[in-house]
Every structure is written in C-alpha cells, then in structure tokens.
Image (cartoon, rainbow, N blue to C red):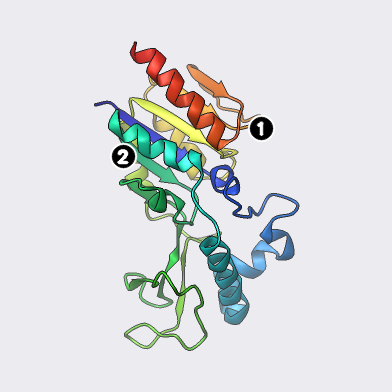
Amino acid sequence: MKNLVVLTGAGISAESGISTFRDSDGLWEQYRIEDVATPEAWIKNKALVTDFYNQRRKQLSEVKPNYGHIGLVELEKQFNISIITQNVDNLHERAGSKHIVHLHGELTKVRSEHYEELVYELPEDKYEVKIGDLCEKGYQLRPHIVWFGEAVPMMREAVGITQQADILVIIGTSLNVYPAAGLVHYVRPDVPVYLIDPKEVSVNRKNVHVIKKGASEGVKELIQRLNDVKK
C-alpha cells in the first residue's frame, strides 16, 4: 500500500468545537500567549498556566471527533496512514487512527517540570491538575505541551515520515507555524499534495490539489478523488 501522510492543524479540531487561538472568539482571545504558553509564563505564574490547561482539557472532554478525523481512519483500509498533527488534543486517537505524531505535545499528558522524560497519561475521568501534584522525584507536574520558544522534539521523526510520503494531505492548517510548516519541503517533487481548507492557504510547490472545504466535507471529497485516481 502507498504511504499517505496527513498534516493536520487547528482547523480539523475547530470543526469539533475546539477553540483555536487565532479565531476572534477562541479560548485564546481571553489570554495572552505570553502569559500561558511560554516557559517564562510557567516560571512567572504556574497557577495561571495550570488553570488554563485545565480549562482546555475540560473543553476536550466535552467534544467528539468529526468526520475529518473519522474519514482518515476509513482510509487506513487503502493506505498506510501516518498523521502528523500540530494539535494537542486526542481526537485522532479517539477516532481510531493508529499512527499519530504530536508535534506540539499532548493535552492529556503531563510531565515533570525538571525531568522531561517523566511523562504521565492522565486518567480519562481527570482533566484537572493542581499545584502540588508532583512527579515521582518531587517536582511539579507541568503540561506535556511544546510551548512557544521550546524545541520540537518530534520534528525529526516527522521529517522522516514525510520523506516517505507517496501522497501528502494537509488539513486545517495555515502553514504559518514553523517548524511544522516546513514539512511540505521534505516531500518529493513528484508527490501529489491535497490541501483541504475553506480559507486561502499558500503552498509554494507544484502538483497541489485544492479542496476548498472544511475538514469533514473536504475529507469526503478527498476519499472520492483518491478512489477516482485508483480507477
């Protein structure tokens, strides 16, 4: 089977009801990124940062995957699917996708603020972390999130996966956030790229097939197009 690599961004999760930080009515509109999503913010006010991510986990517990997520699972019958996501939610996992790389961390996990390798999965029925919740070595638990200004440790793996792509699909990302946006440049020149987004997104390469729709309707059309190509 061919390798189909999918790069997903905030747009696919927004369709499920997850607030994005770019939308005017998004959760992030209530906060400055500098106050809740940087290492400096954590040092300055751990309680505020912890509460912010508690809110995001609560929101995540109230939403479900949409067909944008589910349709990608259905495509696993025809392709070797690898999903590289900029999203920190677990909607791809809950939809049933098997191979997912989270570039920016995972909301359902926490880690030691001192020992990065000490990572813990939160129970499904728990979204709230408190100041005073410690790792096994006695340090505060922080969100398992790649904050602005931090390195992206999964980038190397993502590059390797992208280089093996026979088809690249981009869903719901503006391609403005680096280094994730740079993955497009690792795809072989002959590989077709399918871009699903209701907004204008610029991709500086040939062989790009634009599907100007939201995630759910866009994935439906993608499946149809891929089936037509195989005929």
Choose mark 1 or mark 2, whichever is in front: 1
The correct choice, above or below, for 25 with respect to 193 in the image is below
- As drawn, the label of residue 80 is none
Residue 82 lies, in percent from the top left, at 34, 39
Q: Amino acid at mark 2?
A: Gly
Q: Residues within 10 Å of mark 1 (few under 14, many from 20)?
A: some
Q: Quadrant of residue 183?
A: top left
Residue 25 lies, in percent from the top left, at 74, 54
- As drawn, the label of residue 160 is 2
Residue found at the very far top of the displayed protein: 231
The correct choice, above or below, for 208 with respect to 218 in the image is above
Residue found at the very far left of the displayed protein: 1
Q: In the rendered view, does 163 fall on the left or right side of 18?
A: left
- The structure residue drawn at horizontal position 32% and vertical position 84%, both measured from the top left corner, is 136
Task: Indicate the secondary structure of the residue bearing disc 2.
Answer: helix
Task: Indicate the secondary structure of the residue bearing disc 1.
Answer: loop
Q: Residues within 10 Å of mark 2 (few under 14, many from 20)?
A: few
Q: Quadrant of residue 74?
A: top left
Is residue 192 in view from this perspective? no
Is residue 98 in view from this perspective? yes
Quadrant housing the C terminus: top left
- The structure residue drawn at horizontal position 59% and vertical position 65%, both measured from the top left corner, is 37
Q: Amino acid at mark 1?
A: Lys
Cα–Cα gap, marks 1 and 2: 28 Å
The correct choice, above or below, for 144 with respect to 171 in the image is below
The correct choice, above or below, for 119 with respect to 82 in the image is below
Residue underneath mark 1: 199
